[in-house]
Image (spheres, rainbow, N blue to C red):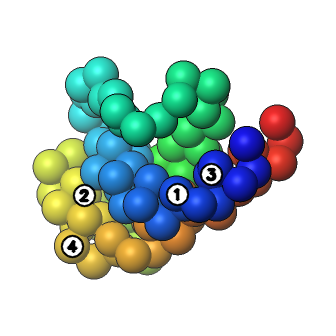
C-alpha cells in the first residue's frame, strides 16, 4: 500500500489539484474516478482532499478569501482561478503531504 502510493504520488497529486480546488471553493465535484486507482485508495484520497481543500479557502466577514496568501475577497470562480494560477504547485505539494499523512494514519 505504501509503495503503491509513493510510486504514484506525483502523478496522483497532479490529477487531484483541480478536484481539491473545486472542493475548496464549493464547486460541485463531478464524480471523479481515477482509473488507475484501486478502490482501497478512495478513502485515503477522499481524506487527503478534504484536508487539503480546507486549507485553500477561508471566509472572512462572510467573504471568500484565499487560504494560502489571504488575498480576497473573491467570487467562487475568482478564487478557483486564483488558486489554479497562483498556487498550483503549493496545492499539489499540500495534496502530496496529505496523501502521505492519510496513508500513514491508515
Ligand atoms: Zn492566494
How far apart marks 4 and 2 lie (CA) works out to 10 Å
Q: If the image is split into quadrants, where does the C terminus sit?
A: top right
Q: Mark 3 and mark 2 in contact (Cβ < 8 Å)?
A: no
Q: Secondary structure at mark 2?
A: helix
Q: Secondary structure at mark 3?
A: helix
How far apart marks 4 and 1 lie (CA) works out to 24 Å
- The disc placed on residue 43 is none
Ranked by sequence position, the earlier of labels 2 and 1 is 1
Mark 1 Cβ inside 8 Å of ligand 1: no
Give percent across and percent down for residue 82.
23, 67
Give percent across and percent down for residue 29.
28, 29
Q: Nearer the viewer, residue 51 or 16?
A: 16
Residue drawn at 52 percent across, 43 percent down: 49
Find disc 1 in the rendering and name its residue.
8
Find disc 4 in the rendering and name its residue.
85
- The disc placed on residue 5 is 3
Give percent across and percent down for residue 28.
25, 27
Amino acid at each position: 500500500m505504501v509503495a503503491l502510493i509513493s510510486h504514484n504520488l506525483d502523478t496522483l497529486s497532479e490529477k487531484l489539484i483541480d478536484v481539491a480546488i473545486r472542493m475548496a471553493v464549493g464547486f460541485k465535484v463531478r464524480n471523479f474516478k481515477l482509473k488507475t486507482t484501486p478502490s482501497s485508495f478512495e478513502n485515503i484520497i477522499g481524506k487527503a482532499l478534504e484536508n487539503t481543500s480546507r486549507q485553500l479557502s477561508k471566509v472572512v466577514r462572510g467573504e471568500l478569501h484565499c487560504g494560502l496568501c489571504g488575498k480576497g475577497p473573491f467570487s467562487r470562480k475568482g478564487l478557483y482561478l486564483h488558486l489554479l494560477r497562483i498556487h498550483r504547485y503549493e496545492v499539489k505539494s499540500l495534496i502530496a503531504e496529505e496523501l502521505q499523512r492519510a496513508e500513514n494514519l491508515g
